[in-house]
Amino acid sequence: MDSSKPQRSLIWIKFKRNRAALFGSFLILIYLAVALLAPVLFPGNPSAPNLMKSLERPSLKHPLGTDELGRSILGRILYGSRISLLIAIGVVCVGLLVGVPLGLISGYYGGKIDFVIQRVTDTLLAFPGFLLALALVAVLGVGLKNTIVSVGISMVPIYIRLVRGCTLGVREQTYVEAARAMGTRNGIILIRHILPNVLTPITIQTSLGMGTAILFAAGLGFLGIGVQPPTPEWGAMLGSGRAYLFNAPHVATFPGIAIFLAVLGFNLSGDGLRDILDPRFK
Amino acid sequence: MMEFHSLLSIRNLRTCFHTYEGVVTAVDGIDLEVYRGETLGVVGESGCGKSVTALSILRLLASPPAEIKGEILFEERDLLKMSVDEIREIRGNAISMIFQEPMTSLNPVLTIGEQISEAIRLHQGLTRQEAWAKAIEMLQMVQISSAEVRVNEYPHKLSGGMRQRAMIAMALSCHPRLLLADEPTTALDVTIQAQIVDLMERLKEEIHTSVLLITHNLGLIAEMARRVVVMYAGKVVEEALVEDLFSEPLHPYTQGLLGSIPWIGRKMETGRRQLQEIPGMVPSLLEMPEGCRFHPRCPRVMEVCKGEEPPLVQKEGRRILCWLWK
């Protein structure tokens, strides 16, 4: 990795110059603000049906219209941001907590343990990511927690591969050998000497991974096997809006735009971070 | 002559690597003795097994693929028979090591102080504050100016010479009895080299450590070592006191090594335009020549050298692995 510790101010200057990354982080900021302030922006219960106002077009009272049960789509999107944020963070945590230690161990120790971890990773990577999440949901069942776990596990092999690859490079550095020559234990070498040196790619992957997580969870929701109604979840909203695509297109369109913007934000920031932090892309 | 007590005694050390192309024997049955308080120089071309010897002593080679055989007695205990915990207790404490590349031997994401105090806390059981104070003290000892400031800095802010000083500070922080210095000055400017040599000489006296100095720089050996071991293709081909080796090299390889050093003024004296060189290259470890390993490059090769391994000749306290002196 980088031979010197990146200077924070320099990173900030480069980040400001990267317009795509700046726009991406702007989207993420809005997204975070909406998730935090949802009850302020939309007082009232986003899940309470009002069948009298079913499928209304956008109006002053309901700026984005209402769905088939007469619930404000704006309110459900605002509250839905909390669900998707929760999923994104949860998924990435599962991926990091399982994938990073396994990748470190696999890359550092090598040998049999590496072989076992890598063959399992190969098997998981052989499935297209979404299919794997789908299969796991089929085993675990629907719901918020299981969505997080399923999508999280489908991300684990990506982290394992990434961290293992970087560890293989860092492991051969003289400072790791020097640490061993000083009598440092393997565990401490892994955590204090190797992990900080592979954090850059992990950070980039985490940003990109949050976008993918939102997309996957929305996909599961769309199929009706993700987060269950009446919880306002973007994918599920999109799924239920599909039935009214011709007479009330706003029901499916606005959740779709919300998903699009959130994923775009994470992807642009992730790409920007990679351009800035990864010396290979300079 | 002074009485010397053996500190490290290597007997028939054989380090080989199991590779896909076959077994590569990097160190092939060498014997070495390091006495208390002395500096033993190990010289040889690249790839002759010098560094592997040092790494074998601390068992730093990943095994597999490496396989280390023989005996390495350190204060009468065989390092090769120790448990993983025992050898870890030795590393950095009783025996420590300095590496060739000061640019890469410090971790870029940890401050100098964090790295030195980590080593101190590991072996001396000091608290964080005590270890930190000791780290500053060590930096002062290796003459890094404004050590209190430097201790908080990351390696990229230090020059090569400063980093090597910091590395020496780290290696000596637990007052090791033996210091393995693997090409400690090779990557540095000449003026910095001289400073580092002076520093190592002084610290060696101060903390009474023995040094195993690995280098291909014969000038450094002349400056620092008391005895020299010349290695070629995994074998010790000559061992002698520094003065004897320089005044009268016996092995043709040693003669070649000494002949290939540039001396200021020699061109004028001899009228030679070129330095002497040893023709050819160190043989691949996979295709060792029969008989004496040096015979394809030896200017004084004889028939016997091509077929039979040379004997170890003891002569006036020196050891030579060559048919010439039989």
Image (tube, coloured by chain):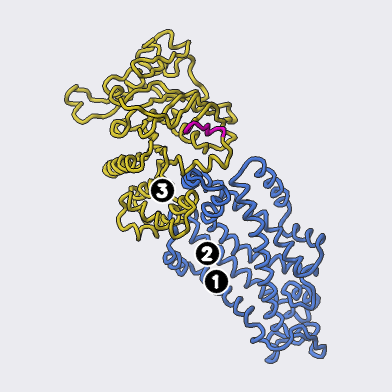
Chain colours: A blue, B yellow
Q: Are marks 2 and 1 in contact (CB under 8 Å)?
A: yes
Q: Which residue lies under the disc numbered 2?
A: A272
Label 2 sits on what residue type? Gly
Q: Counting other residues with Cα less than 10 Å from the Cα at mark 1, is it few (<14), some (14-19), or many (20 or more)?
A: many
Image quarter where the N terminus of chain B lies is: top left
Element under disc 1: helix
Q: Quadrant of residue A217?
A: bottom right
Residue extent of the magenta highlight: B74-81
Label 1 sits on what residue type? Ser
Q: Which residue lies under the disc numbered 3?
A: B173
The chain under label 2 reads A
Element under disc 3: loop
Q: Nearer the viewer, mark 1 or mark 3?
A: 3
The chain under label 3 reads B
> Where does the image place residue B39, in percent across and percent down from the top left?
35, 33
Q: Counting other residues with Cα less than 10 Å from the Cα at mark 3, is it few (<14), some (14-19), or many (20 or more)?
A: many
- Return the mark for residue A25: 1
Element under disc 2: helix
Q: Give the CA distance from mark 2 to mark 3.
A: 43 Å
Does B316 sit above or below residue B170?
above
**Furthest residue toward left:** B268
Return the residue nearer the eye: A66 or B8. Answer: B8
> Where does the image place residue A267, in percent across and percent down from the top left?
59, 65
Q: Quadrant of residue A210?
A: bottom right
